Amino acid sequence: MKNSIAERITDFIKNYPPFDNLSYNDLYKLAVETNVLYLDKDETLYSQGKPPKDFFYIVNQGAIRIYRQDGEKTVEVEMCDEGDVLGLRPLIVNENYILNAKAYEESIVYAIPIQIFNEQFINNAEISKYLITRFASNSTTRFSQEENERIFADYKRTRQTDYFSSKISNLTTTAVSCNHKHTIREAALIMSDNKISSIFILRKNKPIGVITNKILLHTVATGKYSIDESVGEIMGSPVVTASSDISIAQAQIIMLQKKVENVCITEDGTKNSKMLGMVTQQDIVASLSNNPAVLMKQISRARTISRLRDLRQQLNDLLKRYIDQHISFTHTLTVVAELNESINEKVVELSVKELNKTPPCKFAFFALGSQARKEQLIPTDQDNGIIFDDVPQDQIEEVRSFYMELAALITKNLHSIGFEYCPAEMMASNPKWCLSKKEWKTQFQDWIYNPTEKNILLTAIFFDFNFVYGHKKLVDDLSISVYKHTKDNKRFFMFLAQDALKSPSPLGFFRQFIVDQDGAHKDHFNIKQRAIMPLIDAARILTLQHNLKGVNNTAERYYKLRELEPQNAEVYEACAYAFKALLKFKTKNGLTSLGEDDGKFIKLETLSKSDKVKLRRCFKPIKSIQEIIAVRFQANI
């Protein structure tokens, strides 16, 4: 006699990895032994530091918040919702939980017994692939060879490392070093004797610099420095450092952000403590397959725009793979954003070379909108600008003409690799957005002190900007000027808030989705305009009010606001979760829309009932944050 509960569990889990490639009968046998857990809001599923239970979990309904408690600080890791698996890794490696799992709202979770799971699927190749790629549950040590052979039988020869949570200490090697008093000749001899390409310079066992083959090539080999001079004359400084307890994924993010090929591991993670060793890109690449570090290196070595176009497609493939395999969306967003930024930087670099003219003064190319916020996963239309140094008034148009020519080349090349031209021409190739430093400051002041409807619309685009290429100080100076003039500017904030509150509600009467009534996307739901943008707009105005410089990403803005306003912490946390969930939804839709758009228009008939429930859940914080905006800035409209 069939078990109806087991049938419902089987019908659910067969749609999600790692169960989606397994037979129905095998899954049914597992489902018979599975428990159904009903969790109230804030009820704990498992706790940091506690021994693992006999079950791992898959979320059926609701959401489970995953976080780490570092003293009084709460570190967000992920929000797991329908189909997400959690709590598996501690069972596999027999360790305590190092994360907390708590119900974000009323939830239903299936508890799957690990013993039955192992007995049935331990030698299944698809399960092995999934575990290697996905889990991720924050181990403190890499799998031993014995465990690799037992659990990852299909992959035992590769000795794969758990990318997302194995500690970097497992890949740390002894770093060759020399004293800061050594000469370049002595350092080079040590490098030669050890057959290495880099050497760290120490003072009292603390890293103060690094010398690489590349540095030697550009300094000593060119005759700029004598080989008998001190290592301090040519060493790269400061050293990029990290602690041994960060994950491999975190180490790779550091390398991507800092654009370095090695990280110095120290006792406390700073340059002010004893060096323990080093980790290189090669170490990570050797331990993993399909590694984004390889893609980053290929981007840095690209010599043509056509090559970058191919690499941008590979980045799309990487994104799709991460989404399909339920990789942490927070990590996915960070990796893709860094790679995407590097592609844009490389486009500008190649364009400057292609123009083959000497720039008349310092300049910087900067991104606007979603790319500036590091939220652009699928390529959209371009939003960018150029800022150049102030020059005498009689030279400004000649200088602008030069940068307009460069901008036209940049935007053309960006278009050729997949970034469409902006229909509203919010691009550096438009003379309105190719300005001197003084002109840009004047432009922003005009938007701030004359908040007309048009000016407020432009602030929504231009107030999220981020440096891409050139002289970063120009962009930093512009940012300082913006915050100077917005500080305590109640009138500007009132107009900005009124505009933010104009965003249409996602739901109408009877909680029905509001869809476009005409045009090419008739009867489609615009998830960007109706759900994502209200959260972006609210985060921007609150960030400006708090004078928070250097925090562009919307979710990160809400996490920072949570710290600054504990009284509204619950709302801000909900907004951060909703934003990432909505962006993930838009991204998944964009990956399946076959290039029709970036995923913002959703055909409601393609949504399952559970998808609609998840979307409605994400809409709840929008009302709460808009109420805060309306009251704080007296902006009821």
Image (cartoon, rainbow, N blue to C red):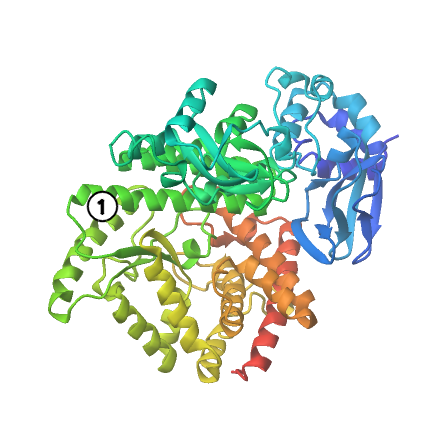
Q: Nearer the viewer, residue 3 or 244?
A: 244
- Secondary structure under the numbered disc 1 in the rendered image: helix
Q: Tell me: residue 571, above or below residue 243.
A: below
Quarter of the figure that contains the N terminus: top right
> Residue 391 in the image: x percent, y percent?
18, 66
Q: Nearer the viewer, residue 195 or 473?
A: 195
Residue drawn at 47 percent across, 77 percent down: 487
The image quarter in which residue 294 lies:
top left
Residue 167 is left or right of residue 557, and the answer is right
Residue drawn at 33 percent across, 54 percent down: 382
Q: Is residue 604 visible?
A: yes
Residue drawn at 31 percent across, 30 percent down: 217
Q: Nearer the viewer, residue 461 or 285?
A: 285
Residue tagged by mark 1?
Answer: 352
Tag 1: residue type? Val
The image quarter in which residue 226 lies:
top left
> Residue 68 in the image: x percent, y percent?
71, 49
Q: Nearer the viewer, residue 434 or 38?
A: 434
Residue 406 is left or right of residue 586, and the answer is left
